[in-house]
Amino acid sequence: MKVLVVGGGGREHAICWKLAQSPKVTALYCAPGNGGIAQVATCVPIKATDVDGMVKWAKENAMDFVMVAPDDPLALGMVDALEKAGIPAFGPRANAAIIEASKAFSKELMKQYHIPTAKYETFTDLDKALAYIRAQGAPIVVKADGLALGKGVVVASTVEETETAVREMMEDKKFGESGSTVVIEECMVGPEVTVLAFCDGEHLVPMLSSQDHKRAYDGNQGPNTGGMGAFCPSPKYTPEIADRCMKEIFLPTVAALKAEGRPFKGVIYFGLMLTKDGPKVVEYNARFGDPETQPILSMLDTDLLDIFQACVNGTLDKMDIRWKSGAACCLVLASGGYPVSYKSGYPISGLEEAEKLGATVFHAGTKAEDGEVLTAGGRVLGVTATAFSLEEAIHKAYAAAQPIHFQDMHFRSDIGKV
Ligand code: AMP
Ligand code: GLY
């Protein structure tokens, strides 16, 4: 089969790496791809958000299957457009991808179907929002409604901080139209765990649980990033909690979306907080997480294309999805200054030595030029290792990162430990 993956980050490298192992995949393409993806797939220079361009290329080049990984093309209806063109595509249609694209929608869905989450109110009027904040007091959480590159959330510890955040979103339009509607919600406390799950519209199969590290610096300090590292499974996600999540959160979410005429086919990302009152939803995403995907797919034994096809065909309940025992850890090597400002175009060395030490190095922001691999983004590489225990996997990932070098390279030294 000729398969196209849409996207070009570390997550897409892991997806392509795993799909390339499938005996069914005879030709693999990735648009736009990156310097590492080019080792396992043919990169096609089309932007991930170019819906018309992508569908046209997939049709002209007779793709048998397309996997859409990032949130924007999903929200823009790329899967709908591919289906219309007669090409089987993995990922939710726009009307289901809305669980990530609109926080107001997903909060309303959870309220209506009694899915545990933080108490909240939605506002389009600044004065009403400010009055609500003053009445509730701090700590409190403010979220821009739409997609804001993961940066539209402020967990504020004082009323003043909360007011500033709301004004920036609603008055100054810091996140553009994403902030015209804001969700203000109760601040939850507890460890955070992520569970990604395959869905076929009706059935759901959770993957291994995982945890990521969103802050830029050690000890969970500094600005929020896309994720500085991740590991799986999470020791905090016990079988008892998993049972509760399945009954109280996962199955009700899939059933709610189906009942609303928005059947979800693809991967649902459940961001969970394990509060003293039980697990609650922090957020839904409509896609694989980045960097969680890198360690998770490193642990998958089953053919990924088979799973994707079962999701599209509604036969996920017939699949036997198997995982390796042990654990995996992904350490992100970022450009100095990320996520605020950073330079790109620096040569990267030591990649082969890292692989020799038993790790898989997934490329996030790189490009291949004249036989050299150069940095080309904030998050540059994800050094990923599997082992029989989490401690060993962490150790192996850090050891493999040792020989890698590029100018101003930055990474956290406590991935998997806090
Ligand atoms: P989100 O983009 O909704 O995942 O939010 C980003 C981060 O903000 C989450 O990973 C949490 O750490 C934090 N957060 C979001 N909502 C809440 C909440 N209601 N209570 C406490 N922390 C939250
Ligand atoms: N690692 C968080 C995300 O993919 O949204």
Image (cartoon, rainbow, N blue to C red):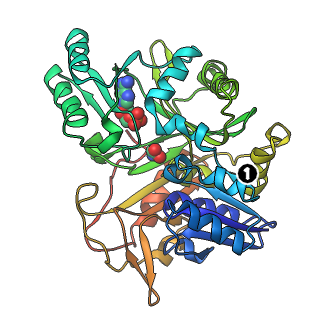
Query: Residue 3's quadrant in the figure?
Result: bottom right
Q: Which class describes the residues within 10 Å of circle 1: few (<14), some (14-19), or many (20+)? A: many
- Which of the two residues, 223 or 385, is positioned nearer the viewer here? 223
Q: Position of residue 81 (x, y in %)?
A: 65, 54
**Which quadrant holds the N terminus?**
bottom right
Residue under the point 20% across and 34% down: 171
Q: Closer to the camera, 200 or 383? A: 200
Task: Tell me the element at label 1.
Answer: helix
Query: In this view of the protein, can residue 87 be seen by the observer?
Result: yes
- Residue on which the image places disc 1: 308
Up-down: is 128 above or below 173?
A: above
Q: Position of residue 210 (x, y in %)?
A: 53, 40
Q: Nearer the viewer, residue 328 or 54?
A: 54
Above or below residue 197? Residue 42 is below
Outermost residue on the bottom side: it is: 370
Amino acid type at image mark 1: Phe
* Quadrant showing the C terminus: top left
Closer-to-camera residue (97/150): 97
Task: Give the residue at x 41% y 57%.
Answer: 332
